[in-house]
Image (cartoon, rainbow, N blue to C red):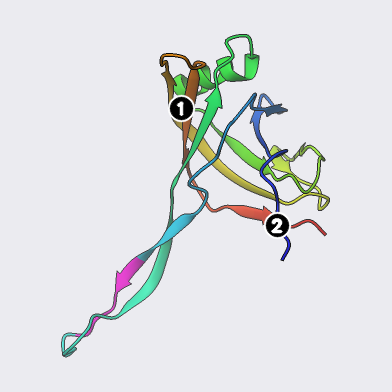
Amino acid sequence: MASIKTQGTQLYFIDNAAVKTLTCPTGITGLGSTRDQIDVTCLNAQSDKSFVGGLGTPGTLNVPFVFDPTALDQRLLFTMRDAATETDWLIGFSDGTTAPTVVSGQLTMATTRTSASCNGYIADVTIDIATNEVVRGTMTIQLTGSTAWTWKV
């Protein structure tokens, strides 16, 4: 069975047509979406309802990170949150090291690395401070469309 280690995974985003890499994310959760249900149950149904798949409902990505006030990309998160800036996000998995490029205004990954790309805006950035710990943050990205996958060839 082939597997991909998490070490080496990177989160990229676009700012002013430039590719940015988030400094020190420690996880990414919530990649995916659910499909709405459309009820097509006939009035004469006797036992169970019937459904067909409807539109997808994108979820949220939660990205915890080690807060670094000197990291310009992390400072940018707060500006993007305040402006509700919608942008491309791309997760580059550890089975390659190629960075994405911007093609026609969108993040694009070569087939030398597995990746998942999506569009969304930063809904929240929180900072957590605790005893005997580093300062940590969590960014929540509200996805606004489907996730596209690039598979390593």
**Badge 1: how crowded within 10 Å, few (<14), some, or many (20+)?**
some
Label whose residue precedes the other's in the sequence (2 or 1): 2
Decide which of 29, 144 is in the foreground and name it: 29
Q: Secondary structure at mark 2?
A: loop
Q: Is residue 64 magenta?
A: no
Give the labeled residue for mark 1. 84
Q: Is residue 40 magenta?
A: yes
Side (left or right) of 119 relative to 129: right
Q: Residue at x 65, y 42 (%)?
A: 91
x and y percent of residue 32 in the render? 50, 53
Q: Amino acid at mark 1?
A: Ala
Q: Secondary structure at mark 1?
A: loop
- For the C terminus, the image quarter is bottom right
Q: Amino acid at mark 2?
A: Ser
Q: Residue at x 82, y 40 (%)?
A: 98
Side (left or right) of 4 relative to 138: right
Side (left or right) of 151 relative to 68: right
- Magenta segment: 37-42
Give the labeled residue for mark 2. 3
**Badge 2: how crowded within 10 Å, few (<14), some, or many (20+)?**
few
x and y percent of residue 79 in the render? 51, 17
Against 40, residue 12 (above or below) is above
Decide which of 24, 61 is in the foreground and name it: 24
